[in-house]
Image (cartoon, rainbow, N blue to C red):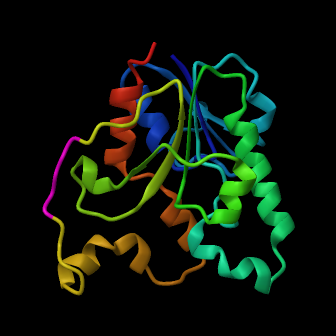
Amino acid sequence: MRILVACERSQQVTAAFRRRGHEAFSSDLAPAAQNPAWHIRGDVRAVLKDGWDLLIAHPPCTRLCNSGSTWLAKRNLWEEMRAAADFFLECWNAPIPRIAVENPIPHGMAISEIGRYYDQIVHPHFFGEPQFKATCLWLKGVPPLKRTHTLELPKKGTLEYKEWSHCHQSPDSRNRDVKRAVTYPVVAEAMAEQWGVCV
């Protein structure tokens, strides 16, 4: 398949599909982290009509996710939220037969702007990586991801629980948002393994 992975600089998802023989390309305003030959640098909206079979999109979530909702009123970020929702919808409504859009858990106002709830929530531990990171998926033409592992969850308050929450417990840093946005390899592998056969 010809696969476009929107807003991905890490190329975790792109590389997982490439390993299975697909013609996959990442796209982002920033340069690629792995192979620039597989990367379309620029606004992904310019290439959404270029004959893709599958789009996996990771649109910016800062103004849409539940964790950042308190800042909307305090900083009057409503227009930024609407712009983020418009970008999300441009990906969702792209003329591509199979689409998966990924974002963290959204707040209610974002759901109102987007117009529909997510189809599924997955965590890395569903696929064998002992980590919490709730990831919502909006799906069109592809099935929900099937869980491959059932790990015993740690109890809240324990050191193990804190280790599983590494993504959320990471200290503030200049590029914290970039690190947190990277798709866990086990999730990328599940996408490539399960969606790569949806022809």
The secondary structure that dominates the magenta segment is loop
Q: Position of residue 52 (x, y in %)?
A: 63, 20
* The stretch drawn in magenta includes residue 29: no
Instruction: Identify the residue at image location x=39%, y=31%.
Output: 192
**Relative horizontal placement of residue 71, taking residue 65 as reference (left or right):** right
**Viewer-closest of 176 and 98:** 98
Question: In the figure, residue 132 lies in which quadrant?
Answer: bottom left
Q: Is residue 166 above or below residue 79?
A: below
Instruction: Identify the residue at image location x=42%, y=29%.
Output: 143
Q: Position of residue 57 (x, y in %)?
A: 60, 41
**Viewer-closest of 114 and 158:** 114
Q: How many callouts does the rendering have?
A: 0
Q: Position of residue 10 (x, y in %)?
A: 51, 50
Question: In the figure, residue 164 lies in which quadrant?
Answer: bottom left
Q: Position of residue 11 (x, y in %)?
A: 50, 43
Magenta span:
148-152
